[in-house]
């Protein structure tokens, strides 16, 4: 038996012993009563009765243990031409003072704080300061529109919002404050106060009596110590796309999260404390929460905050420049970033310009990794390229080649095997396991390991119905796939209407809600079509109400999605059709439309109402350039 099998079996045979051993790497205020509280299935809690502080574990204890002078965060921002290092001692000071500022304004244990910030280290300071107080942060990605922010404000009902005057997208400066003000106007709930980081590129107007300047607040603040919280108390809420316009508030607890993430740093990523680790994502996504902020800091590593893109800041050598300049030993990003680099530098000429001798591995996740991209990265970088599969819900990888345990043979198209703690099965519609190599719903046997989501914010029923109801005893991942004869997992597609656009998770259902709100639209459908750069792109179809002229409806719905969901949706194509293809019971045949758009073989379902509509759809798609050549 190989080392991976041994560790995996140990976690299966005695999960409590396995995770209790991992929990020894965390400093506890009070040890847990039970490693796994299984008294209320299908709801499980890890480390019940335990008390700790996540911020203490991520910051203070490293200062106490002699890492004070080590870099905790390296901020590298080609868009502002800045490189800045923050040591663990400096981070402790900033976080303690920001926590003091929040506390002085009434934020305490259990209160929510929304963080709406670009990729600046102050975002981590705000998150950690909340954790220090036992307040619950909810970071909202900067590429979302005011309307999405308003939805989150109403759901999380934050006491405070922390934001910045702007974000910078390559050459564009995006003013955040007008979006924040608009969101607060739209929301029924109003925060007590907002703290705004003024960046030199844009000065935000501050609202009297509500908004304060970050710098002023920090200068006057008294440091606040870490507050012990229950292991089962929420650390954060992170909203992610569900099947409707109402996003799901994924809840992460303190204890299981700290234990699991600390464990993954060595076992999955093979990183040692003191090393520089880089996750090129954004704090607004789960990858940013887990692998820009919490895991590297819990581990005493140095994390990189990169405010830039893989290309255009200034060229496709940006990633190699950062790795080489800061001696990063590992990079984690989405395959789309590599497709963007490869498109501009197919021969990888920029790679040769930098010393990458210390670089050990590339990790990819966020969307299916096409074998071409994986092979290209392997060839050009000469290090293992690890595709791993996870979700906002799970907080860390469900399946991965665990580099710190044993490098298993890499197979392009597969994120390898389940990580220890995950008992993964493929189920048919009736919930029966299917034979190896057969496609079905990927589901994890309950309980899920620590660090996964114990519930949805204010929505326990939705948690049950969305994830636990269809397959009793299992967590339904929402992904379909196969497990082959060797236990390798292949994640093939979502079973719901979620699409992945440049590694960003979006709901076509939410986009349909926006299209349907146009006064001239009678019916609509949005599908995700294949895209060589972004993986998938949304395309919309609208049927107009009787008497409505074509006018500018398609441009208008494109603008509406941008205004209501955000530029990150990359919704740029819509077409007017006379009818939508449906089954006799009225279900829109989105999967068939997608196959036509992607130029795949398809057979009209037997239940189709009128097969002739498919020809109209084909023609309409051809009119807007689908299927794409090649
Ligand atoms: N704040 C404001 N706007 C943002 C934003 C932010 N934080 N992030 C993205 N946007 C905007 C972009 O400016 C763009 O707007 P536009 O339509 O006006 O051009 C739109 O949202 C889409 O952005 P993006 O998805 O980044 O696409 P892109 O075409 O600008 O760049 C890639 C393409 C592949 C280079 C880019 O998507 C990328 O770097 N992806 C990496 C993947 C990643 O980080 N995934 C996270 C999960 S691991
Ligand atoms: P998110 O919650 O934004 O992390 O998106 C999670 C979804 O992205 C998963 O449910 C998958 O559909 C997809 N995904 C993430 N990683 C992978 C991967 N390595 N391979 C295939 N799909 C992936």
Image: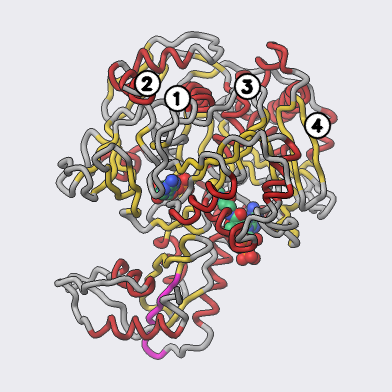
Q: Secondary structure at mark 4?
A: helix
Q: Earlier in the sequence, mark 4 or mark 2?
A: 2
Q: Residues within 10 Å of mark 2 (few under 14, many from 20)?
A: some
**Of label 1 and label 3, which has the lower sequence position?**
3
Question: In terms of sequence position, does the residue under pointer 2 or pointer 3 come before the other?
Answer: 2
Q: Is mark 4 within 8 Å of ligand 1?
A: no
Q: Can you tell which mark lies on residue 171?
A: none
Circles 2 and 1: CB atoms closer than 8 Å: yes
Relative depth, front residue between 332 and 291: 332
Residue 185 figure quarter: bottom right
Real-space Cα separation, disc 4 to disc 2, in angstroms: 46 Å
Q: Is 545 a magenta residue?
A: yes
The residue wearing badge 4 is 218
The residue pinned by badge 2 equals: 7
Instruction: Name the residue that disc number 3 marks.
Output: 273
Quadrant observed for ligand 1 in the rendered image: bottom right
* In the depicted structure, whether residue 264 falls above or below residue 244: above
Span highlighted in magenta in the image = 539-547
Which quadrant holds the N terminus? top left
**Mark 3: secondary structure:** loop
Kindly report the secondary structure that dominates the magenta region of the rendered protein. strand
Tell me which numbered mark, 3 or 4, is placed earlier along the sequence.
4
Closer to us: 570 or 456: 570
């Amino acid at each position: 038996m190989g080392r991976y099998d041994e560790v995996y079996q140990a976690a299966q045979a005695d999960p409590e012993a396995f995770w209790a051993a991992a929990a020894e790497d965390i400093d506890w205020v009070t040890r847990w009563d039970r490693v796994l509280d299984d008294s209320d299935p299908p709801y499980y809690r890890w480390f019940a009765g335990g008390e700790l502080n996540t911020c203490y574990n991520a910051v203070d204890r490293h200062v106490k243990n002699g890492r004070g002078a080590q870099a905790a965060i390296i901020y590298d921002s080609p868009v502002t031409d800045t490189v800045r290092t923050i040591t663990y001692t400096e981070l402790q000071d900033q976080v303690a003072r920001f926590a003091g500022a929040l506390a002085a304004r009434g934020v305490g244990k259990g209160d929510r704080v929304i963080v709406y910030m670009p990729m600046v280290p102050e975002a981590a300071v705000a998150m950690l300061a909340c954790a220090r107080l036992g307040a619950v942060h909810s970071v909202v990605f900067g590429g979302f529109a005011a309307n999405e922010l308003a939805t989150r404000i109403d759901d999380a009902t934050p006491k405070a919002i922390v934001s910045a005057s702007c974000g910078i997208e390559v050459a564009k400066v995006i003013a955040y404050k007008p979006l924040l003000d608009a969101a607060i106007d739209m929301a029924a709930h109003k925060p007590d106060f907002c703290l705004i980081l003024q960046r030199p590129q844009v000065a935000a107007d501050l609202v009297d009596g509500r908004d304060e300047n970050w710098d002023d607040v920090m200068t006057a603040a008294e440091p606040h110590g870490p507050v012990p919280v229950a292991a089962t108390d929420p650390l954060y809420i992170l909203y992610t796309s569900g099947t409707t316009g109402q996003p799901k508030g994924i809840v992460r607890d303190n204890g299981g999260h700290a234990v699991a993430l600390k464990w993954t740093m060595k076992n999955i990523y093979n990183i040692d404390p003191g090393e520089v680790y880089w996750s090129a994502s954004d704090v607004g996504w789960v990858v940013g929460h887990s692998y820009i902020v919490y895991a590297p800091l819990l581990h005493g590593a140095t994390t990189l905050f990169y405010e830039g893109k893989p290309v255009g800041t200034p060229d496709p050598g940006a990633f190699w420049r950062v790795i080489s300049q800061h001696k990063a030993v590992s990079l984690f990003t989405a395959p789309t970033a590599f497709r963007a680099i490869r498109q501009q530098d197919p021969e990888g000429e920029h790679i040769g310009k930098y010393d990458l001798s210390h670089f050990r591995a590339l990790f990819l996740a966020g969307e299916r990794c096409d074998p071409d991209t994986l092979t290209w990265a392997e060839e050009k970088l000469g290090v293992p390229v690890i595709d791993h599969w996870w979700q906002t819900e799970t907080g860390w990888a469900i399946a991965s080649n665990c580099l710190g345990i044993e490098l298993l043979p890499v197979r392009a198209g597969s994120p390898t095997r389940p990580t220890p703690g995950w008992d993964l099965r493929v189920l048919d519609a009736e919930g029966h396991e299917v034979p190896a190599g057969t496609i079905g719903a990927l589901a994890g046997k309950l309980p899920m390991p620590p660090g996964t989501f114990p519930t949805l914010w204010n929505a326990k029923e939705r948690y049950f119905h969305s994830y636990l109801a269809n397959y009793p005893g299992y967590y339904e991942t929402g992904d379909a796939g196969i497990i082959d004869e060797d236990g390798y997992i292949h994640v093939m597609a979502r079973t719901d209407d979620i699409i992945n656009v440049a590694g960003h998770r979006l709901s076509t259902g939410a986009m349909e809600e926006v299209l349907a709100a146009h006064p001239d639209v009678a019916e609509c459908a949005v599908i995700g079509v294949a895209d060589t750069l972004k993986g998938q792109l949304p395309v919309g179809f609208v049927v107009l109400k009787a008497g409505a002229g074509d006018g500018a409806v398609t441009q208008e719905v494109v603008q509406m999605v941008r205004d209501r969901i955000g530029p990150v949706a990359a919704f740029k194509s819509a077409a007017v059709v006379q009818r939508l293809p449906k089954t006799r019971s009225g279900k829109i045949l989105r999967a068939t439309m997608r196959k036509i758009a992607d130029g795949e073989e398809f057979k009209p379902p037997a239940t189709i109402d009128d097969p002739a509509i498919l020809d109209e759809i084909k023609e309409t798609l051809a009119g807007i350039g689908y299927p794409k050549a090649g």
